[in-house]
Image (tube, grey):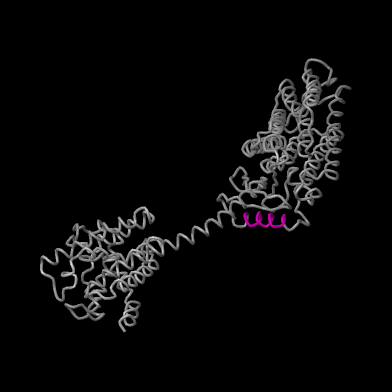
Amino acid sequence: MIGVYVACVIISIVICCWYFWVDVRRSVIQNIMLLILLIGNVGYLCLAVSKNLEEAILSNKLCYLSGCFLPVLYFLTVCEVCQMRVRKIWVAVMVCVQGAIYGLVCTVGYLNVYYTSVSFATNNGIGYLVKEYAPTHMLYIVSVLFYFAVAIVIAWYAIFRKKNTNRIELIVMVVCSGVAIYGYLVERIIDIDYEVMPVFFIILSLGALIPIYHSDIYTVTENQEVIDMQLNDVGFITFDRNTRFMGANETVMGLFGELKDVHIGTRIAKPSELLESIIQEVGAFFEKLDKTEQEAKQLVVGDKTFELRNHKLKNFLGQYVGLTIEFRDVTEHAKIVELTRKYNEELSLEVEKKTERIKSMQERTILGMAQMVESRDLSTGGHIRRTSDVVRIFAKKLLSADAGMTRSFLELVIRSAPMHDLGKIGVDDAILRKQGRFTDEEYAQMKKHSEVGGKMVKEILTNVEEPDFVRVAFNVANYHHEKVNGKGYPEGLKGEEIPLEARIMALADVFDALVSKRCYKEAFSYDQAFAIIEKDAGEHFDAKLAAVFLTCRPELEAYYDEAMI
């Protein structure tokens, strides 16, 4: 039998530690209740191992500490679950009355007020008291039965009349308290030698377990005053992980009338279409166990617009056990946003049309200048168009090859390609229109076209185009003749010192020069051209870019077969 008492003490300790860990609200009443339940079980264990009357009486007083105050605390817990407030003055009166009864218990061993006689006995090594009860002992029994009866009435009323209570939890608490009362009465009537109340104390502890475990879900009703005072028209509705309705404030109740007939802890039987969509989202959240904060969503109910935000609820293990959905009235804001949106759409459409027109004029002007330059160069007919198309084919391959370049960057390179030889406008006609190879002096003059082109691009585009496009176009014009081995021009840059866009342009520019007929050479075959690209990878061209460029061969051959017709 000693083992039973020890087990009860251990279980009480575990339950207390677990409750202190779980109880996010730090409920004073419930935590005190669990503490005195533990004290009671310790008292019964001490009584069982007592060696004399003095030890047994002291242990008995520890047992009565639970016996006297537990009914009040359990009653207050039932009231809390029933969403019924007990005024502090009445709580104080109840505690004082039970304190007075405990005062009578404390006279045992000194006066015959509570027990007319008391002696110590043992049975199989288990100590217990042999007691003769005085009439005042009935005060204790009456108090226990009183609180149990009132708790039954309140729970019964809440189960059948109040919707904002969890009927299952109330029934569990009432049944547990009923079992404990029944056990106590049986023990007194039969007058057995062993104390069985420790077992019933554990049952009472379990009866209080569920409400405390769910304490972090009951954020709606238990914080109603805070919500009303500080958040005004903000609505809240809470569901558990099984999409059971766990409470809502008046704002949400007014939006969804069907909630008024729904009991807490149950599923909503016939939700409206809007409420059903919210419930489905709650279910989807727990199916996916999405731990990321979701963006606010909007919901239109009647003539009002609400912004919905999810607030995830966790238990002591960090597991998601519920979801509180916040309804914030943003009707006026939504109207302003809608009007602003329509105005901005109209304005944006108008600006877009004008911007596209200006951009088209700019591109046509630049392309016209490039073509005008090309018309002066007798050796490069169609070069601008072809290199631009080669860059487009190359850019598409780079994007699909996941080479670390964004679509927006490659689009800027494509737009910049027609301007790569714009600087030739500053080259003397005699050099530009020469049939045959250049002399060293002529070649030196020709090489200046890249720097001249870079300056022209900056002057033409700055403050007209976006800075990123100006930068890319400048780099394409200024550096497309640089080589990764540092032997290019105009600055002799090496490797990654050369801007990426210029390295891309270099491949397209050289390839077109190779496969096109010039005044000083015949067109190379595709095999020859691609062999030169492969050979010069790492010397003239960026090796990684060249590797991707070589994979463009089918597309480039098909393009040039058609373009050269």
Where 24 sits versus 514, above or below? above
Residue at the far top in the pictured view? 110
Q: Is residue 440 magenta?
A: no
Q: Nearer the viewer, residue 302 or 94?
A: 302
**Magenta span: chief secondary structure:** helix
Q: Is residue 277 magenta?
A: yes
Q: Quadrant of the N terminus?
A: top right
Residue at the far bottom in the pictured view? 565
Residue 142 visible at all? yes
Quarter of the image for residue 487 reads: bottom left
Residue 324 visible at all? no
- Indicate the position of residue 59 as horizontal and vertical percent values: 72, 25
Residue at the far right in the pictured view? 135
Quarter of the image for residue 141 reads: top right
Residues rendered magenta in the picture: 274-285
Left or right of 75 in this view: 538: left
- Indicate the position of residue 415 as horizontal and vertical percent values: 36, 64
Q: Nearer the viewer, residue 288 or 487?
A: 487
Q: Quadrant of the C terminus?
A: bottom left
Q: Which residue does the image show at 25% across and 80% down from the upper left?
A: 527
- Indicate the position of residue 229 as horizontal and vertical percent values: 70, 34
Q: Please give the count of numbered marks on the rendered protein.
A: 0
Left or right of 430 in this view: 403: right
Q: Which residue does the image show at 75% across and 43% down from the upper left?
A: 250
Q: Nearer the viewer, residue 170 or 552?
A: 552
- Indicate the position of residue 16 as horizontal and vertical percent values: 65, 35
Q: Nearer the viewer, residue 142 or 266?
A: 266
Left or right of 33 in this view: 415: left
Left or right of 120 in this view: 153: right
